[in-house]
């Protein structure tokens, strides 16, 4: 479940609130943000703070949003945080669905079946025919991309590709996946970093500056290297290959796809070896 999925769920929840609870004419897009601390959940939203018809009704509206969000099987918990925020914790399967979607979209597009689907995820993964970040993110605006940052992204992408080669040599299969096994705290951080990329790209395009998207990509690259160290995709020589390893290989494939796509969006190449 991505931030965009949660935005849709929140919009529906606001539409079902009892009369007088939501401010008349409220139609501002509902923000879904990363919380300030991991202990607060996967995502947070100020929807009740922004949409309540009166300050004294914020908690009531937040309670309604929590009830509606909790009906979704991907949501493990939704709780009120004053003064009108809702903190959302996803189930391991709900959190990991994004990597399944990324691989599916990439494989579909590779088969030439992309069609006219312009979902946020496909917008991120779509090949860019523009030659620079300036043209992609903000036509006519001078956008500077730090070459050191691009090198860091390339290193993260190359590290992920190196781990994929190790997994392939070890004979880890690509079937028998159980994405719910991706529940280590490092995996939670990595999956949320992946899920937040489409909205970061949209912010960069809207603001006409590369920083939101670039910072999100750099955070993902850093997170991936930490994840590879703490959650090995490839087992040791005396360890059996398990569904956890096959599931981590799926996540690794998705990470490689999005890092390469992110570099393309910035007008840079994505070498597999450095």
Image (cartoon, rainbow, N blue to C red):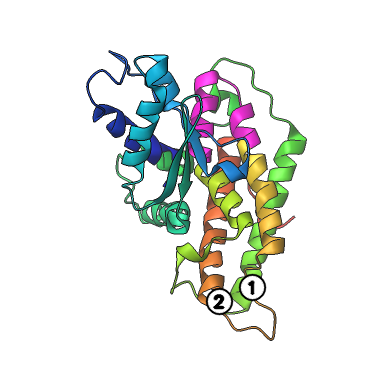
Q: Residue at x 61, y 66 (%)?
A: 164
Label 1 SS: loop
Query: Please, which residue is most extreme toward the front here?
Result: 56
Q: CA distance from mark 1 to mark 2?
A: 8 Å
Whether 182 is drawn above or below 211: the answer is below
Q: Does residue 6 belong to the magenta stretch?
A: no
Q: Please identify the dominant SS of the magenta region.
A: helix
Q: Which mark is residue 10?
A: none
**With 101 as the anchor, is 235 left or right in this view?**
right
- Decide: few, some or many residues near mark 2? Use Cα within 10 Å; few <14, some 14-19, many ≥20: many
Quadrant in the picture for residue 141: top right
Q: Earlier in the sequence, mark 1 or mark 2?
A: 2
- Decide: few, some or many residues near mark 1? Use Cα within 10 Å; few <14, some 14-19, many ≥20: many
Q: Residue at x 71, y 58 (%)?
A: 273
Quadrant where the image shows the C terminus: bottom right
Q: Which mark is residue 234?
A: 1
Residue 49 point in image, percent of width and height? 44, 22
Residue 157 point in image, percent of width and height? 65, 52
Pointers 1 and 2 in contact (C-beta within 8 Å):
yes
Q: Does residue 201 belong to the magenta stretch?
A: yes
Residue 125 point in image, percent of width and height? 47, 44
In the foreground, 17 or 44: 17
The part of the chain drawn in magenta is 196-215
The number of callouts visible is 2
Residue 213 point in image, percent of width and height? 59, 33
Q: Residue at x 52, y 33 (%)?
A: 33
In the foreground, 101 or 26: 26
**In this view of the protein, can residue 132 be seen by the observer?**
no
Query: Please, which residue is most extreme toward the bottom here?
Result: 238
Q: Which mark is residue 172?
A: 2
**With 100 as the anchor, is 113 left or right in this view?**
left
**In this view of the protein, can residue 62 be seen by the observer?**
yes
């Amino acid at each position: 479940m991505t931030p965009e999925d949660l935005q849709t769920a929140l919009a529906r929840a606001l539409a079902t609130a009892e009369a007088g609870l939501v401010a008349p004419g409220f139609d501002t897009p509902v923000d879904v943000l990363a919380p300030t601390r991991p202990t607060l959940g996967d995502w947070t939203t100020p929807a009740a703070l922004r949409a309540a018809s009166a300050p004294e009704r914020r908690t009531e509206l937040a309670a309604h949003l929590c009830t509606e969000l909790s009906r979704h099987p991907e949501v493990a918990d939704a709780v009120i945080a004053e003064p009108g925020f809702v903190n959302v914790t996803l189930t391991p399967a709900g959190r990991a669905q994004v990597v399944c979607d990324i691989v599916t979209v990439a494989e579909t597009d590779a088969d030439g079946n992309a069609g006219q689907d312009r979902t946020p995820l496909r917008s991120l993964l779509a090949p860019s025919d523009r030659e620079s970040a300036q043209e992609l993110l903000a036509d006519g605006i001078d956008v500077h991309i730090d070459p050191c940052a691009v090198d860091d992204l390339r290193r993260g992408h190359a590290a992920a590709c190196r781990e994929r080669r190790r997994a392939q040599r070890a004979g880890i299969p690509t079937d028998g996946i159980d994405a719910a096994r991706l529940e280590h705290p490092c995996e939670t951080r990595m999956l949320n970093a992946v899920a937040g990329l489409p909205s970061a790209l949209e912010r960069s395009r809207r603001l006409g500056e590369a920083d939101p998207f670039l910072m999100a990509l750099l955070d993902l690259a850093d997170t991936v290297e930490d994840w590879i160290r703490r959650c090995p995709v490839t087992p040791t020589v005396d360890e059996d290959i398990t569904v956890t390893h096959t599931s981590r290989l799926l996540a690794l494939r998705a990470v490689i796809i999005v890092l390469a796509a992110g570099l393309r969006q910035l007008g840079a190449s994505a070498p597999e070896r450095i």
